[in-house]
Image (cartoon, helix red, strand yellow):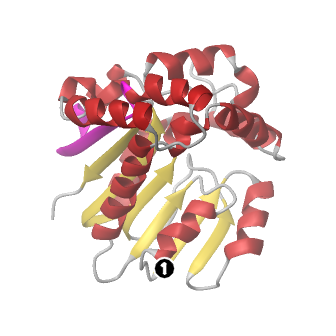
Amino acid sequence: MPEPIEERDRREREAYADDAMTRNNAEWQIRFSHIVHGPTTQRGWDTMFSVIAAGMGDEGRVLDVGCGPGYYTNLVKQLGARYVLGYDISEHYVYKAQRDYGVPGELDFRVHSAHQPVEGDFDVVCGFAVLHHLDFRAFLLEAYNRNLKPGGRMVFWEPMSHPVTLAFHKFVRSAHSDDEWPLTPKDVRWMHDTFAHVGIRPVNLASMFTNAASSLLFPEADNPLSRVGDRIDRVLECRRRLAPFGQMGIIVITKPL
């Protein structure tokens, strides 16, 4: 018998009741900071935000799912969105988001489970490392059918099945909640089978290794070794069969008009 969604929500709420989990994850990012700040990752972020901005349309209504403390929600608002709603299951993070970034009627935050429906039509539904926390298949279907306007986009930045990412999630459990796991090739196939228009771009394939090594060898993230990895990835990321195997993936699901 499937586990009740309420139980999974409870575990996530408890895991992110304070900053401990996020802090543990950040400590690993600091050790290998060039993975986060290297040219391939920065190019991925540029693509992510460009896709979000291009999908806003005239009304510019955006839903940020799993908004956390609101940092990325605020960046989305700065792209030109007229209205952004961010929600998260953590009261701790929603309080911080509302305190630091909230603007009533323009940038709103609320405590809400992604496993429960939310009302409203949006040009863009986005999330930053949120799907791998969820029963994401049910969530995507609900958001696509209920919330996404015709011609709108769902855009997500998610950990994928790169060997290093899988090892990190398996062996460094203090940096993740019990239910988190990177998206798999099977998950990617489901997306392509379920939605008419899906694009997935891997971020950090070969550059995952070169950036990790360069963190130990160079003071700057943009260095000769990280640039070699980026040049290799520019070739590899065009190959569709490699889409599930980036350190991260940019997932774009477009709803036909």
Q: What is the x, y in percent for residue 62? A: 44, 69
Q: Quadrant of residue 20?
A: top right
Q: What is the x, y in percent for residue 8? A: 67, 33
Q: What is the x, y in percent for residue 52? A: 36, 63
Q: Secondary structure at mark 1?
A: strand
Q: Quadrant of residue 210?
A: top left
Q: Nearer the viewer, residue 174 or 216?
A: 216
**Would you say residue 134 is visible in this rendering?**
no
| As drawn, 94 above or below 131 | below
Residue behind mark 1: 83
Q: What is the x, y in percent for residue 88? A: 65, 55
Reply yes or no: does residue 86 show up in magenta: no
What is the span of residues highlighted in magenta in the rendered image? 192-206
Question: Which residue does the image show at 82% across and 46% down from the upper left?
Answer: 17
Q: Nearer the viewer, residue 217 or 16?
A: 217
| As drawn, 220 above or below 59 | above
